[in-house]
Amino acid sequence: MTPPTIKFLLVDDLDANLLALEGLLRRDGLELLKARSGPEALELLLVHDVALALLDVQMAGMDGFELAELMRGTERTRRVPIIFLTAGAVDQQRRFRGYEAGAVDFIFKPIEAHILQSKAGIFFELAKQREALRQNAEEAHAASRAKDDFLAALSHELRTPLTPVLMSAASLQDDQRLPADVREQLAMMRRNIELEARLIDDLLDVTRISRGKLTIAPIPADIHELLRHSDDIIRSDGQDKNVQVDFELTAVRHHALADPTRLHQVFWNLLKNALKFSPAGGTVTVRTRNDAEDRLVLTVEDHGVGISPEALPHIFRAFEQGDVVGQHRFGGLGLGLAISQAIVEAHSGEIHADSPGVGQGATFMVALATVEAPAVAADTPAEPASLAPALRLLIVEDHEATRTMLARLLSKSGHRVTLASSIAEGLAAVALDHFDAVISDLGLPDGSGLDLMREIRRQRPVHGIALSGYGMEEDVRQTREAGFFAHLVKPVSIDQLRQLLAHIPQAVK
């Protein structure tokens, strides 16, 4: 990249002086702007950014001090360094006025070339360094953005093929006609697909954290309930490894104003790590208590591989798993703890790790402020899927396996399904029929699902559900603005999709 030209402003009402200054200061990479009066200098400053202004003090009309004061009064030029050039003696009062007006130095005429060149050269080098820093910052920002875009695109490509597999496994797992051992294997498949999706989520969460865009939606949440839910999900991992998970939940106040999904992610990470790094036949202990500040203090203690004292201060850094012999055999991306720390801190909480050393286990502690338990509301039975109204659905998805699986499962639920694989096919279907809802992928071969939804809604009102491998806040915002009422991130849960459809009223025929 060619470095931009650095500019100095020379102001003197005598052409001969300007020519002399130009001759002394001329160098590669420096542009010298010349003005013969204060007003002319101000005009140049409106359109040029200068690294130094050399102002003659004695000028007709507006003198150098007055020009400097005007420069200091304008945000654009108030930080431009000024060197005054003067032919006469400067008494203490005038010197003080000059510095008060913003001068960094005085040079007396007749000008000694080496003094002028030395002082001006300092500002030239400073400007070059500032510009280099600015360019480096821009390049770093561009590289960071490219990395984030790559991770988002990678997550999309990884998520898309997971959707039909997850839907198939979930559907077959619920089929009571299959033998129990087959359904257990399907449950194992489903857990591992969901784990793969969780790893993809971790990559995106790191991107959110680096951009400062990790958000939470706090509600009163029962921490004990979230812990039990996390245990339900990872219980099979403990059984496979013969690791016992003991719960000692003694906290009296165990509700917090929290985002349940995000805190569940933290607890899942801590339990998963404790099981991962525990030896076969080991024990993991989960405890809660209330401290003197009435906070809920959670500890997850294992007796596994431990953490070295050198690695302990860095354990919450992304892509690090601590100094453990053979750590790579345990798998994972080393993102879970970094994400957990960001989530806990977003809740104004604390998270710490402690370990006596390698081979001596580790304890992780989370502390959260508590709130009063909410009043218990009477349960309202959910409407069975079989009683949900049958809808006319348009599915627009270019991934054939996902399209086919969606059609099969939604047709089994009683919906009438029309399929399309592009915007053109989707619009052609809309021209022939009225649909209650459009379920559309966002990345289509002939454009974006956002464009499809805008065009359909321009013709008639319709409910839209977006399917995407992208799940950043900006992606969700764009789908909402295009007219979708829901944004599902792949791999899509068929149960979640059915729940959304159950709340869509049938459109007027």
Image: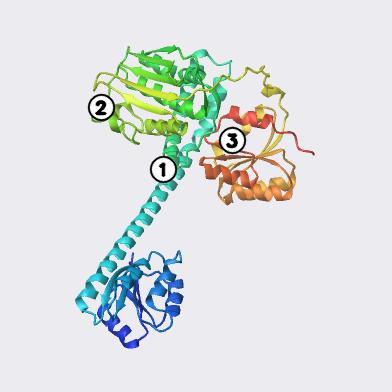
Residue at image mark 2? 324
- Work out how far the residue at label 3 is from the one at label 2, CA to CA, in angstroms: 46 Å
| Comparing labels 1 and 3, the label whose residue is closer to the camera | 1
Which of the two labelled residues, at mark 1 and mark 3, occupies the earlier sequence position?
1
The residue under the point 38% across, 56% down is 138
Q: Identify whether 305 is placed above or below 130.
A: above
Please tell me which residue lies in front, 104 or 412.
104
Residue at image mark 3? 404
Question: Quarter of the image containing the C terminus?
Answer: top right
Circle 3: residue type = Thr
Residue 422 in the image, given as x and y percentages of width and height: 60, 47
Circle 1: residue type = Ser
**Crowd rating for badge 2 (residues with CA inside 10 Å; few <14, some 14–19, many 20+):** some
Judge from the rendering whether residue 478 lies leftward or rightward of residue 115; answer left or right.
right
Q: Is residue 179 visible?
A: yes
Which of the two labelled residues, at mark 3 and mark 2, occupies the earlier sequence position?
2
- Work out how far the residue at label 1 is from the one at label 3, CA to CA, in angstroms: 37 Å
Which of the two labelled residues, at mark 2 and mark 1, occupies the earlier sequence position?
1
| Comparing labels 3 and 2, the label whose residue is closer to the camera | 2
The residue under the point 46% across, 45% down is 153
The local secondary structure at tag 1 comes to helix
Please tell me which residue lies in front, 168 or 367.
367
Q: Identify whether 404 is placed above or below 13.
A: above
Residue 3 lies in quadrant: bottom left
Residue at image mark 1? 210
Question: Quarter of the image containing the N terminus?
Answer: bottom left
**Crowd rating for badge 1 (residues with CA inside 10 Å; few <14, some 14–19, many 20+):** few
- On residue 331, which mark appears? none
The residue under the point 74% across, 33% down is 505
Residue 396 in the image, given as x and y percentages of width and height: 62, 42
Residue 302 in the image, given as x and y percentages of width and height: 33, 17
